[in-house]
Image (cartoon, helix red, strand yellow):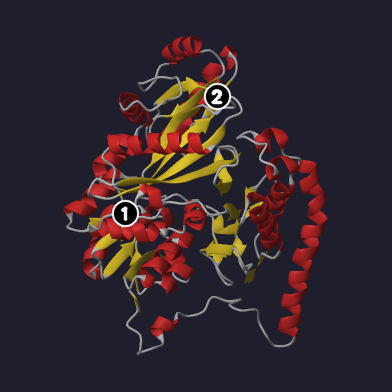
């Protein structure tokens, strides 16, 4: 097995990868921008090397600098996490050419699935059902009008070169097509450097279902059940669960087999996710493939007992999968909430500041994947996700009840968070009993209920503030109120170094 790997990421996913690596006896190398030098992931690594860049984000996107650090540090492999360089075929190719193992799929697979239009062509050829739409990129509004009329409104505009909701527009009437098309082009160009979009038929009231796939370099493929990611805001997932509350075993197997065929069609190795839209009649259509580890992977881990990061490392080392499809069993139900530093009482505006108090919930069936602690600073430079809260229960309602309890016991002071909003989602009857689709927040969520929770939430924050003041008056400080100097610099007994 690898002796040392570099994690080309930051925040909670870097910590997540490092924890499993440590369990496996693998040393880890962190790369960090100066703004992150006191971050949890930097302190968690065995070695840490500083990145230089005009901006913090550009530093984490500097392929050549990261590869050079990997060579210098003696890292045998690079794990990209998610985001940043994780789905950049050029990075995977450069890593491989440098004689370093890329812990993920081959560059060719990333390229094939990175373009939505190319991916659709491959899936159609492989017999995978796709949403009716264009096979080619569209840059001309007149051609877009012709296609929209052929498909019939409503239609969905999407950026051809990327995902994450960027460049996406729903169009219900012909008069709205041109302004929506131009807006989608501008957003796509800004996000991906490519203003090409494509059109597909808009499936009304769908669920967003995804299948986790694992495959090794010896031709073995398995799927690890499904995740329901339908609770979304502005096309971004905020709550995920596994398994879905609506799939029958027959449909689960059908979707799983299709997902495996999709992975085989692009000669895929390592962990990947096939995303589908599921209509009200339980017909499913290929949406896209994410050629990396997903943010929501913990819910799959909790219902299958399979550590996906561990499997990624073993596959990258060249091992065969140690289990077959028949060995994969679903046990109970899991729910994940993404904890963002956003103000739910002010249109979910991102919030920044120093986390002066951070108390994670705990208990049976509760897991927290966090990238912050007391003393961590939340800046404007990165995505505002602080952590992921995951609960597991014997059934769906038990998992939701545990999530509600965990959210009530999660305490963060210094920045506003979406915890009150997530609590309101957990309590909503349509969510609790599975009667929701991707339009839940837009059409069904009761923001008046959220507003009623504001006073209760502010009382809790005030109580935390009082606690901090009381400790200060007693000449004490909450743990890590101020960023502390890394112990790596203070101990001659440790081999860990901040470089």
Up the image or down, 12 lies above or below 26; here it is above
- Camera-side residue of 128 and 293: 128
Left or right of 276, for residue 26:
left
Left or right of 113, for residue 434:
right
- Camera-side residue of 285 and 115: 285
Question: Pointer 1: what residue?
Answer: 62
Element marked by disc 2:
loop
The answer to whether residue 49 of the structure is visible from this angle is: no
Up the image or down, 35 lies above or below 57; here it is below
Q: How many marks?
A: 2
Quarter of the image where one finds residue 469: bottom right
Question: Pointer 2: what residue?
Answer: 203
**Residue at the image point whose x is 40% and y is 52% from the top:** 327
Element marked by disc 1:
loop
Quarter of the image where one finds residue 142: top left
Mark 2 vs mark 1: in front? 2
Image position, residue 66 (x, y; %)? 29, 59
Up the image or down, 371 lies above or below 203; here it is below
Image position, residue 222 (x, y; %)? 36, 46
Sequence-wise, the earlier of marks 2 and 1 is 1
The answer to whether residue 222 of the structure is visible from this angle is: yes
Q: Residues within 10 Å of mark 1 (few under 14, many from 20)?
A: some
Say which mark, if any, is on residue 406. none
Left or right of 455, for residue 383:
left
- Camera-side residue of 407 and 84: 407
**Residue at the image point whose x is 35% and y is 33% from the top:** 115
Image position, residue 477 (x, y; %)? 66, 82
Quadrant in which the N terminus is drawn: bottom left
Which residue is most to the bottom? 492
Q: Residues within 10 Å of mark 2 (few under 14, many from 20)?
A: some
Quadrant in which the C terminus is drawn: bottom left
Up the image or down, 224 lies above or below 53; here it is above
């Amino acid at each position: 097995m690898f002796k040392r790997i570099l994690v080309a990421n930051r925040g909670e996913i870097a910590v997540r990868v490092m924890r499993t690596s440590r369990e496996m006896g693998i040393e880890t190398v962190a790369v960090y921008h100066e703004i992150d030098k006191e971050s949890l992931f930097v302190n968690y690594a065995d070695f840490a090397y500083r990145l230089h860049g005009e901006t913090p984000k550009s530093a984490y996107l500097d392929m050549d600098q990261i590869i050079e650090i990997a060579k210098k540090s003696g890292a045998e492999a690079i794990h990209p996490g998610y985001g940043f360089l994780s789905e950049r075929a050029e990075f995977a190719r450069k890593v491989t050419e440098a004689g370093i193992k890329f812990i993920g799929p081959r560059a060719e697979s990333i390229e094939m699935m990175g373009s939505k239009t190319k991916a659709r062509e491959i899936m159609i050829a492989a017999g995978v059902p796709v949403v009716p739409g264009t096979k080619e990129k569209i840059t001309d509004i007149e051609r877009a009008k012709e296609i929209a009329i052929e498909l019939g409104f409503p239609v969905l505009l999407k950026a051809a070169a990327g995902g994450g909701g960027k460049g996406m527009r729903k169009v219900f009437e012909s008069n709205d097509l041109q302004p929506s098309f131009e807006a989608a082009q501008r957003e796509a160009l800004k996000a991906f450097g490519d203003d090409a979009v494509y059109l597909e038929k808009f499936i009304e009231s769908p669920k967003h279902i995804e299948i986790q796939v694992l495959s090794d370099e010896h031709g073995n493929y398995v799927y690890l059940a499904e995740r329901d990611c339908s609770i979304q805001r502005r096309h971004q997932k905020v709550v995920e669960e596994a398994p879905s509350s609506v799939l029958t075993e027959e449909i689960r197997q059908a979707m799983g087999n299709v997902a495996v065929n999709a992975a085989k069609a692009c000669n895929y190795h390592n962990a990947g996710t096939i995303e589908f839209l599921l209509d009200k009649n339980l017909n499913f259509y290929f949406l896209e493939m994410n050629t990396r580890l997903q943010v929501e992977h913990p819910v799959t881990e909790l219902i299958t007992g399979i550590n996906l990061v561990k499997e990624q490392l073993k596959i990258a080392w060249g091992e065969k999968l140690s289990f077959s499809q028949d060995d994969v069993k679903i046990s109970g139900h899991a729910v994940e909430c993404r904890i963002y530093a956003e103000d739910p009482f002010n249109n979910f505006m991102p919030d920044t500041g120093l986390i002066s108090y951070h108390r994670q919930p705990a208990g049976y069936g509760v897991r927290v994947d966090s990238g912050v602690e007391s003393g961590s600073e939340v800046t404007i430079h990165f995505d505002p996700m602080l952590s992921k809260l995951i609960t597991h229960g014997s059934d769906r309602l038990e998992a939701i009840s545990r999530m509600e309890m965990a959210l009530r016991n999660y305490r963060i002071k210094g920045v506003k968070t979406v915890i009150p909003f997530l609590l309101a989602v957990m309590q909503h009857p349509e969510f609790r009993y599975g009667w929701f689709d991707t339009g839940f927040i837009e059409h069904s969520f009761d923001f008046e209920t959220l507003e009623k929770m504001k006073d209760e939430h502010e009382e809790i924050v005030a109580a935390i503030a009082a606690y901090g003041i009381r400790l200060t008056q007693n000449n004490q400080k909450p743990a890590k109120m101020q960023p502390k100097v890394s112990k790596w610099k203070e101990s001659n007994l440790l081999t860990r170094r901040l470089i």
